[in-house]
Image (spheres, rainbow, N blue to C red):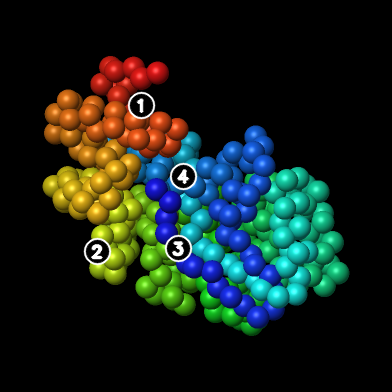
């Protein structure tokens, strides 16, 4: 359930700047990177993984324990300085503290925007999400001199970092600023809808998801996510319709199958709910959706090894 986003943006003066997802995927597996990976690749899955609402406190506890959403924004830097930038990013991910010092030194000796971005990535890897978000937003707004596409991408990453900090209102504001520059950007709309849902602004999330589905009627992620949002506002029939549309567009969509199981459970059909959740586990046993399916199965007194 990776959220779709921009293609690469080619600029005239820097080497390629990968997405945050690219950066983490290319780094070595280290325990301190586990939360970072979860943030980058699991947000939509984890929101879809929430079971039917019960007590408000339980729902809030699940939210706090879950990671926010996947990075969707691609930044690309071309030309002079690419190798130095790539080395800086690798250092920031492999050893964030040392990487931060390296990036700061590069910035202070004229490294410019790539060095400032590397500093922000190191801060993010250190768990300083709010500071990373602030610096990414500042970089995007620096003199308004950066190319428009790059500013959009940096604002998108800032929003992602604010979500990692659980600052959903700040995230919504930054995504909103990016959407003013690119109103029909599906990736940004998805990101903002996720921030709206985490802050329990479900109707606002539905509005953004409606825009996505108007642009891409078979967008399975948006359909499955809108189904979840509809369920949270008590519109289970609309949720069921969206689940079926998502599964028609993508028959093995994990989020849609998980959501259908939840809707079946709410309708009292435990047999069908169990079948949906078992299917999720068979298809992707290590996924966040499978973990949620196991949790839901436990509520039906079924233990899954």
Q: Quadrant of the C terminus?
A: top left
Could you classify mark 1 by the number of other residues whose Cα lies within 10 Å: few (under 14), some (14-19), or many (20 or more)? many
96 or 169, which is in the foreground? 96
User: How many numbered marks does the figure carry?
Assistant: 4
Q: Position of residue 192 (x, y in %)?
A: 41, 60
Q: CA distance from mark 3 to mark 1?
A: 30 Å
**4 or 2: tag closer to the N-terminus:** 4
In the rendered view, would you say 202 is above or below 264? below
Q: Say above or below: 78 vs 133.
A: below
Marks 4 and 2, how far apart at CA: 23 Å
Q: What residue is disc 2 on?
A: 217
Residue indicated by mark 3: 5
Q: Earlier in the sequence, mark 2 or mark 1?
A: 2
Q: Is residue 209 left or right of residue 86?
A: left
Asked if residue 196 lies left or right of residue 301, the reply is right
> Is 278 above or below relative to 301?
below
Q: Which residue is mark 4?
A: 42
* Most foreground residue, 217 or 179: 217
Q: Earlier in the sequence, mark 3 or mark 1?
A: 3
Question: Dot 1 corresponds to which residue?
Answer: 294
Residue 256's x, y, as percent? 27, 44
Q: Are marks 4 and 1 in contact (CB under 8 Å)?
A: no
Q: Residue at x 76, y 58 (%)?
A: 87
Residue 183 appears in the picture as rendered: yes
Q: Residues within 10 Å of mark 3 (few under 14, many from 20)?
A: many
Q: Find numbered disc 2 in the image and state the secondary structure of the residue it sits on.
A: loop
């Amino acid at each position: 359930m990776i959220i779709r986003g921009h293609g690469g943006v080619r600029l005239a003066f820097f080497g390629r700047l990968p997405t945050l997802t690219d950066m983490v995927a290319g780094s070595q597996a280290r325990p301190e990177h586990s939360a970072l990976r979860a943030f980058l690749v699991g947000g939509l899955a984890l929101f879809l993984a929430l079971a039917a609402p019960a007590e408000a406190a339980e729902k809030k506890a699940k939210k706090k324990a879950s990671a926010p959403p996947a990075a969707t924004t691609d930044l690309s830097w071309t030309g002079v300085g690419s190798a130095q930038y790539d080395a800086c990013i690798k250092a920031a991910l492999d050893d964030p503290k040392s990487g931060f010092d390296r990036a700061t030194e590069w910035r202070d000796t004229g490294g410019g925007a790539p060095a400032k971005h590397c500093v922000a990535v190191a801060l993010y890897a250190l768990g300083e999400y709010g500071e990373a978000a602030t610096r990414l937003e500042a970089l995007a707004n620096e003199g308004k001199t950066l190319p428009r596409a790059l500013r959009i991408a940096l604002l998108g990453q800032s929003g992602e970092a604010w979500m990692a900090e659980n600052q959903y209102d700040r995230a919504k504001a930054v995504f909103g600023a990016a959407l003013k520059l690119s109103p029909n950007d599906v990736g940004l709309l998805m990101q903002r809808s996720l921030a709206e849902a985490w802050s329990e602004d479900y109707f606002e999330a539905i509005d953004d998801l409606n825009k996505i589905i108007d642009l891409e009627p078979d967008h399975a992620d948006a359909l499955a996510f809108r189904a979840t949002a509809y369920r949270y506002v008590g519109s289970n029939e609309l949720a069921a319709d969206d689940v079926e549309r998502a599964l028609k567009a993508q028959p093995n969509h994990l989020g849609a199958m998980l959501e259908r199981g939840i809707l079946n459970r709410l309708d009292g059909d435990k047999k069908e709910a169990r079948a949906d959740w078992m299917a999720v586990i068979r298809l992707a046993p290590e996924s966040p959706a499978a973990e949620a399916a196991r949790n839901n199965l436990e509520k039906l007194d079924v233990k899954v090894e």
